[in-house]
Amino acid sequence: MNFDDTPEEAAFRSEVRAWIAANAPTHLEAELKQSSFGNMGLKSEDPIAAAKAWQKKKFDAGWACLHWPKEYGGRGATPIERVIWGQEEGAYGTLGGLFTIGHGMCGPTLMAWALEEHKRKLLPAMASGAEVWCQLFSEPAGGSDLAGLRTKAEQATDGSGDWIIQGQKIWTSGAQNSDYGILITRTDPNVPKHKGLTMFWLSMKSPGIEIRPIKQANGQSGFNEVFFNEVRIPDNQRLGAVGQGWTVSLTTLMNERLSIGSGMPTGFPELFDYCLNFQTEDGPAADDRMVRSRLAQYAVKASGLKYTGMRAISALSKGETPGPENSIGKLVAGATMQELAMFALDLQGQAGVILDPAHAEAAARFQAMLLRSPATRVEGGTDEILRNIIAERVLGLPGDIRVDKDVAFKDIPTSGR
């Protein structure tokens, strides 16, 4: 593949660069450049308001959700143009974290499965940043087995056709800031677990929804528990047919792994710069042979991730759907970030325990990265799940033995039974 811009791409890049230079919130640039993984880092103004303002400005000028069709609030741009935008947006792209789940996961699912009237209403509002979305998938009893979910949806007995939702979700990123969500439920416990699921979209302001933020090790609360107590959803908010929820969820999951894996930082550029400037007793850390060896290893991984991501971009440019190979990026990036952060803190020695950005080395970026990195290896599919996907669906290896494959969900034994 030739990574140089074509004349058309160069012209597009020039247009993007000029618009960003004229419209970006430059007063936030310094803070955004110091942001740590999982934290926008804004203190001078409300981060949610700043994110929505930047998204709205992009939307009004036709730069939001570039790859989406124009009728849904996008630009109809090519995948390569989307990459160019991301490269040029730079630190300001951090403001888009609030919308990652909506734009990268919920939006594509709605485009594929929602009613046309709902697409035209919901997607432009999502693209503009006016409405924030989350995805309600994981459950406390399910672990890594999404198909083992127990949140149930039953049709109301009043003849309305509405669905009544009862159950709990967990690890729902951004639920406390969300206006809407996509929800997968169990509608039939009498069939094997993958066949009795149904997907919906719903307002997060619906009566009966309770959101409880979860306090994380890094002091933040980006994840949430969400409880459903007889929440009513109209049948026309169903995505796909009754019992087709697993198929619909695969649309979300494939886009989730592309969105997370292709955009997940490893921290290598920050580590490289840090090693060039960090002074040890023997001089700059980068002068040490062992440090250079480790940097070389991380450089190889970062390069591999970059070009693996370009494969996905090439597939998109040909009109192909994101596939299971996108699990590679998420698997490698998450583990690399954790390992790299630990190495940086080893270099700092006892100073590595300082968490206050005002006093810690490198403004505590590596401390924040280490505390957030375990979550990256769980969200969007655990390392073990991703390895199974790669083994079975990319490499064609035999699948794991599944004793519950043809067993009705209600008959699957659980602990304590």
Image (cartoon, rainbow, N blue to C red):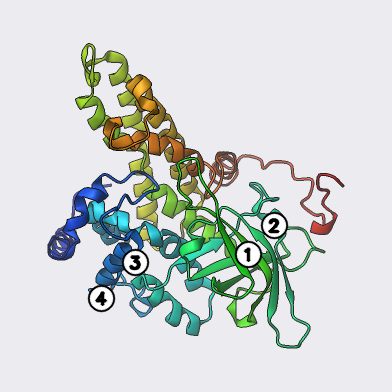
Residue 243 lies, in percent from the top left, at 70, 69
264 above or below 272?
below
Q: For the residue marked with disc 4, what is the amino acid?
A: Asp
Q: Give the CA distance from mark 4 to mark 1.
A: 33 Å
- The answer for how far apart the CA atoms under marks 4 and 2 are is 40 Å
- The residue where tag 3 is placed is 67
| Residue that appears at 44% across and 33% down | 338
* Residue 402: percent from left, percent from top: 75, 45
Task: Tell which circle, 3 or 2, labels the residue nearer the N-terminal end.
Answer: 3
The residue carrying mark 2 is 149
Residue at the spot of label 4:
60
Q: Is residue 57 left or right of residue 375?
A: left
Residue type of the residue flagged with mark 1? Ile
**Distance from Cα at disc 2 to Cα at disc 1:** 8 Å
For marks 4 and 1, the one nearer the N-term is: 4
- Closest to the observer, 11 or 353: 353
- Circles 2 and 1: CB atoms closer than 8 Å: yes
What type is the residue that disc 2 sits on?
Leu
Single out the mark in the foreground, 3 or 2.
2
Residue at 61% over, 73% down: 240
Q: Position of residue 324 (x, y in %)?
A: 51, 50
Name the N-terminal-most of marks 4 and 3.
Answer: 4
Residue at the far bottom: name it: 159
